[in-house]
Amino acid sequence: RARAYAKLRDEPSVTANGVPFELHLNAGLLIELTRLEETGAHGIGLFRTEFQFMVADTLPRLAKQAELYKSVMDSAGSKPVVFRTLDLGGDKVTPFAPSMREPNPALGWRAIRMGLDRPGLLRYQLRALIQAAEGRPLSILFPMIATPWEFKAAKDMLMREVAFARGRGHPVPERVEAGIMLETPGMAWAIEHALPHADFVSVGANDLMQYFFAADRQNSRVWERYDILSPAALQLLKTIREACSRHNVPVSICGEVASQPLEAAVMLALGYGKLSMAASGVAPVKAMLARTDTGQLGTWLAGNMSRDAASLRPLLIEAGNAAGL
Ligand code: PEP
Ligand code: MG
C-alpha cells in the first residue's frame, strides 16, 4: 500500500468523473514543510502559528516570528501557504498567559477575540507576516470569527499594517488576501454580510462541529455521539458552500474530517473542491477521490440529506459497497 500511495503522489488530482480538486496540508512546524514534497500536496492550507507561542516561555519577538514565517514561505517555494493568526485559548494554551484560565475555555476569550482586545499582539504578528512575505503573495486566515464585524476589524488592522509598511518604505507583499475561518454556527448564519469583504473562507470543521453539537472536541465521551455525516451537519456545510458560491468566494474545508476518505468524498460532493488536512491523509484521500464519482454521490446526497437519521454513514457505506468502492 505504501508503494501504491507513493505512486499516487504524481497522479493528477481529479475525481472519477473528472472534477479537479486540491489537497493541502495543515502544519504548525517548519519541519512539516518537507511533507509538501513527500505527499505532492498543493500547498499549506492551514499554518497554525500558535505553536511557536505555545513552546515559548516568553512572547516571541517580531523578528523571531518573521524569521519563522519567512522560512515557511521559503520552504514552500512556489506553493501557496495560508497563515492563520494566533489561535490561543480554548484547547491551545501558553505558559505565559495565566489570565486565560477560564471556566469554559472553549467558549472563552480565545483566538480573534484576544487579537482584537489586545491589538498589540495581533498587530505585531501581522507586521511580522508582512515583513516575511516581501514581494510574495500573503494569505492570512483569522480564526474563530463569530460575527462579520470581527472579520472586518481584523482585516482593517491587516490593511492598516500594509499601508504602514508601505508608508515607511518597507517591502510589502505582492498581494494580500484575508480569509474567514468559519468555526462558529453563528457566523454561518451571518456569512452573507461578511462575504463581500472576504477573499476566501476556510471551514474549521473541528471547532464548527464542537459548537454545532455543543460537544467538547477533546471529550470522546461526548463527541463520539455526533457525526459530521448527519443530515443536520451536512445541511449546514451545504448552506455555507452555497453562500460562498453565490458571492464567488473560494471556500475550503480543514479539520480532521478532511483527512478521512469517506468524509472527504462527501465534502467534494457538496462542492468543497479544496481540502486541507494532516499529511498522513493525503494519499488515502486522493485514492478515494480518484475512485469516486462525486456527481453521482451529490445526487445521492440530495436525495438523502433530509432523512430522519442520526448519521448517513451506514447508508453511505452501503451505497459505496454497492458501487464497488
Ligand atoms: C478546526 O477547528 O477545524 C481547525 C482546523 O483548527 P484547529 O484544529 O487548529 O482548531
Ligand atoms: Mg479551530
Image: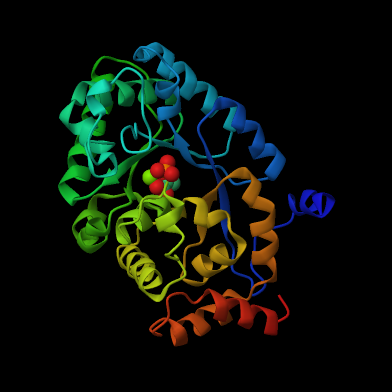
Residue 153 in the image: state x and y as whole percent.
17, 39
Residue 249 in the image: state x and y as whole percent.
35, 57
- For the point 27% across and 59% down, the residue is 185
Q: Residue furthest bottom?
A: 303
Residue 172 in the image: state x and y as whole percent.
36, 24
Residue 260 in view in this figure: yes
- For the point 22% across and 62% down, the residue is 192
In which image quadrant can residue 223 be found?
bottom left
Q: Residue furthest front?
A: 221
Q: Please, is residue 166 above or below residue 5 in the view?
A: above
Relative horizontal placement of residue 137, taking residue 321 as reference (left or right):
left
In which image quadrant can residue 78 be found?
top right
In the picture, the quarter occupied by the C terminus is: bottom right
- For the point 69% across and 80% down, the residue is 321
Picture quadrant of ligand 1: top left
Relative horizontal placement of residue 193, taking residue 48 as reference (left or right):
left
Relative horizontal placement of residue 88, taking residue 109 as reference (left or right):
right
The tally of labels here is 0
Q: Please, is residue 152 above or below residue 193 in the view?
A: above
Q: Please, is residue 167 above or below residue 196 in the view?
A: above
In the picture, the quarter occupied by the N terminus is: bottom right
Decide which of 132, 171 is in the foreground and name it: 132
Residue 251 in view in this figure: no
Decide which of 32, 175 is in the foreground and name it: 32
Q: Please, is residue 145 above or below residue 322 in the view?
A: above
- For the point 39% across and 84% down, the residue is 308
Residue 39 in the image: state x and y as whole percent.
69, 44
